């Protein structure tokens, strides 16, 4: 045991305590940084998941479905224009025939009034002749019936004219072609916007994903690089182990001279180990800090790209929805307009069919014409047999025959026009029934598909933005607030100074005299750098060679970390 001569030696226990405090600080600080980086790693994973959701929200299926529905709407609108154009042509023909019936009706009413006058003249001219009186009564009977029927017919024609006027007025204002052209342009723009939005999201998401994966990979590398803290911790523990071994060896020394020699060599070795550890720790933590600063820059790029992905995204989808909704509104107006026109066509068909019936008024007027002509011919023949007395009645009978013929001509013309009107109205109705595309349904379906895709996209964009903000904030916090080297280097340097030695390298002259200490300490090391320093001062000794794989791995941790 040695005592008095040792008072000049460094306080080894105090040094060990100081080293323990440094080791504790390093461990605490690197654990804190590791936890923060692990949290950042998890956030990047959530960001990548959100990016996948963005590209999947407006996927090919949703985009293609919306595009197919919008395309079907365009086809339906084109078909509608063609149908309405054909209907318009038929309506023009119906209107022309309807307008031509009114003057014919007036002609018939004039002819019937004249025939009434002729009946009165027959009574006057054939006064006293029973046959002529009966003839006048028959004419009055048939003409009176015809007048009532033609008045009913004229009323129905007026009703029909009102229906046709409503159909005509409904077609006034902006032309259907102009409306559909405007709507078609809107739909085409919506289609292009859908495809552009999908392509833009894919590009931005791909760019964000690339940077996010790069951040994730580099966060992983920085996490690996944080092993510098563990390496420093182990090397401090090894220095502490050296102090403990030294103290144990000193207790065994049998002379003060030998103890002093061992102390000088051991202190020089431990000071050298501490100095090397400080140097490596400083350099390696500088790499870690630079890496984290680079990570902060890339995190900001993620945030910027996320902003580009989301900024105008909602506006784009809203513009698409508004465009398609406008189409829905215009198509609805066209549909309502078509419904009113269809009602007018149906009424035209119904009235025309009714008036065309042989039981109808015009058909009966044809019978009246035939009856009056027969009566007129008979009256004319009888008037010829009566000689001069029947001459006046013969003239009236000839006139009646002429006007009855005119009545028939007008009736035939009206019947022909009514037949044409009924056919054109039936053709319009058939065209409406043959439409292949339910335009309103397709537009509504497209709006629903786009709205759903937009909602999903916005959810994932929000998640991506929140994750991007969290990444930037977390890494910024690490770079700003977690200084892996702050105060530690100074504290470790203070520990080295406590040894009272510079720890210079060079083989000790009496290295062979300290074999026990050397071999016990050499067996503790786990890193090549420590063994190299040890051998430089105390030589190789007879200690077994420890694998240097771990040391090589630790030295390679920083190869790919810098940005």
Image (spheres, rainbow, N blue to C red):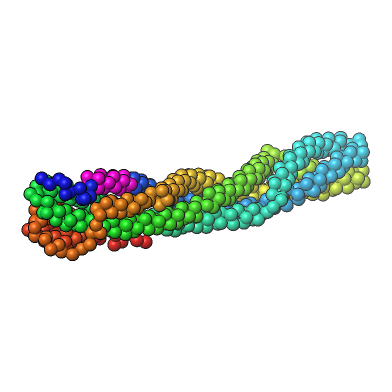
Prevailing SS of the magenta stretch = helix
What residue appears at the point 27 percent right and 51 percent down from the top-left corner? 498
What residue appears at the point 36 percent right and 46 percent down from the top-left corner? 36
Q: Is residue 41 left or right of residue 346?
A: left
Quarter of the figure that contains the C terminus: bottom left
Res. 527 image quadrant: bottom left
Does any portion of residue 235 appear in the rendered image? Answer: yes
Q: In the rendered view, would you say 549 is above or below 314?
A: below
Return the residue found at the far front: 4
Q: Is residue 22 left or right of residue 260?
A: right
Q: Nearer the viewer, residue 351 or 375?
A: 351
Task: List x then y, in percent, for residue 49.
Answer: 38, 48
**Was residue 556 drawn as part of the magenta stretch in this picture?**
no
Q: Is residue 218 left or right of residue 117?
A: left
Return the residue found at the far bottom: 506
Does any portion of residue 520 appear in the rendered image? Answer: no
Task: List x then y, in percent, for residue 448.
Answer: 50, 44
Task: List x then y, in percent, for residue 305.
Answer: 46, 55
Which segment is the magenta one?
12-31
Q: Nearer the viewer, residue 490 or 332?
A: 490
What residue appears at the point 69 percent right and 52 percent down from the top-left corner? 174
**Was residue 18 drawn as part of the magenta stretch in this picture?**
yes
Q: Nearer the viewer, residue 19 or 53?
A: 19
Task: List x then y, in percent, for residue 500.
Answer: 25, 54
Q: Nearer the viewer, residue 371 or 36?
A: 36
Q: In the rendered view, would you say 131 is above or below 22?
A: above
């Amino acid at each position: 045991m040695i005592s008095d001569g040792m008072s000049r030696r460094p306080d080894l226990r105090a040094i060990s305590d100081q080293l323990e405090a440094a080791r504790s600080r390093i461990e605490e600080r690197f654990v804190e940084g590791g936890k923060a980086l692990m949290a950042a790693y998890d956030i990047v994973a959530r960001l990548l998941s959100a990016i996948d959701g963005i590209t999947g929200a407006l996927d090919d299926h949703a985009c293609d479905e919306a595009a197919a529905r919008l395309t079907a709407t365009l086809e339906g609108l084109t078909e509608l224009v063609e149908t309405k154009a054909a209907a318009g042509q038929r309506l023009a023909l119906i209107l022309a025939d309807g307008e031509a019936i009114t003057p014919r009706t007036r002609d018939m009413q004039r002819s019937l009034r004249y025939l009434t006058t002729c009946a009165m003249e027959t009574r006057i001219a054939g006064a006293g002749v029973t046959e002529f009186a009966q003839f006048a009564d028959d004419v009055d009977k048939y003409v009176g019936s015809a007048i009532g029927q033609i008045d009913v017919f004229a009323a129905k024609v007026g009703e029909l004219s009102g229906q046709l006027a409503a159909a005509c007025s409904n077609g006034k204002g902006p032309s259907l072609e102009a409306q559909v052209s405007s709507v078609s342009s809107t739909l085409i723009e919506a289609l292009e916007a859908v495809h552009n939005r999908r392509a833009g999201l894919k590009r931005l998401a791909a760019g964000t994903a690339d940077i996010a994966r790069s951040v994730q990979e580099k966060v992983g590398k920085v996490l690996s690089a944080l092993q510098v803290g563990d390496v420093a911790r182990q090397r401090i523990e090894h220095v502490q182990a050296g102090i403990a071994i030294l103290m144990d060896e000193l207790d065994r020394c049998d002379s003060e001279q030998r103890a002093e020699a061992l102390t000088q060599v051991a202190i020089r070795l431990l000071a050298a180990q501490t100095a090397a550890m400080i140097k490596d720790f400083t350099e390696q933590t500088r790499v870690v800090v630079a890496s984290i600063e680079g990570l902060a820059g890339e995190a900001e790029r993620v945030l910027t790209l996320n902003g580009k992905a989301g900024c105008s995204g909602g506006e784009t989808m809203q513009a698409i929805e508004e465009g398609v909704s406008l189409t829905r509104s215009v198509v609805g107006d066209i549909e309502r307009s078509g419904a009113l026109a269809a009602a007018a066509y149906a009424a035209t068909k119904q009235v025309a069919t009714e008036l065309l019936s042989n039981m109808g008024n015009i058909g009966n007027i044809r019978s009246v014409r035939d009856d009056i002509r027969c009566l007129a011919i008979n009256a004319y023949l009888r008037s010829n047999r009566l000689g001069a007395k029947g001459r006046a009645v013969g003239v009236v009978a000839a006139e009646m025959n002429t006007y009855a013929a005119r009545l028939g001509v007008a009736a035939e013309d009206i019947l022909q026009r009514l037949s044409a009107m009924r056919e054109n109205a039936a053709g319009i109705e058939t065209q409406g029934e043959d439409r292949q595309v339910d335009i309103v349904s397709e537009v509504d379906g497209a709006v629903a598909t786009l709205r759903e895709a937009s909602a999903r996209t916005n959810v994932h964009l929000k998640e991506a933005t929140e994750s991007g903000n969290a990444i930037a904030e977390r890494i910024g916090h690490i770079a700003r607030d977690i200084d892996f080297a702050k105060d530690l280097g100074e504290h470790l340097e203070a520990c080295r100074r406590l040894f009272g030695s510079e720890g210079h390298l060079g083989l000790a002259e009496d290295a062979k005299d300290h074999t026990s200490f050397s071999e016990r300490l050499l067996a503790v090391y786990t890193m090549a750098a420590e063994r190299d320093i040890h051998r430089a001062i105390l030589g190789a000794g007879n200690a077994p060679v420890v694998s240097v794989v771990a040391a090589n791995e630790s030295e390679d941790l920083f190869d790919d970390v810098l940005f």
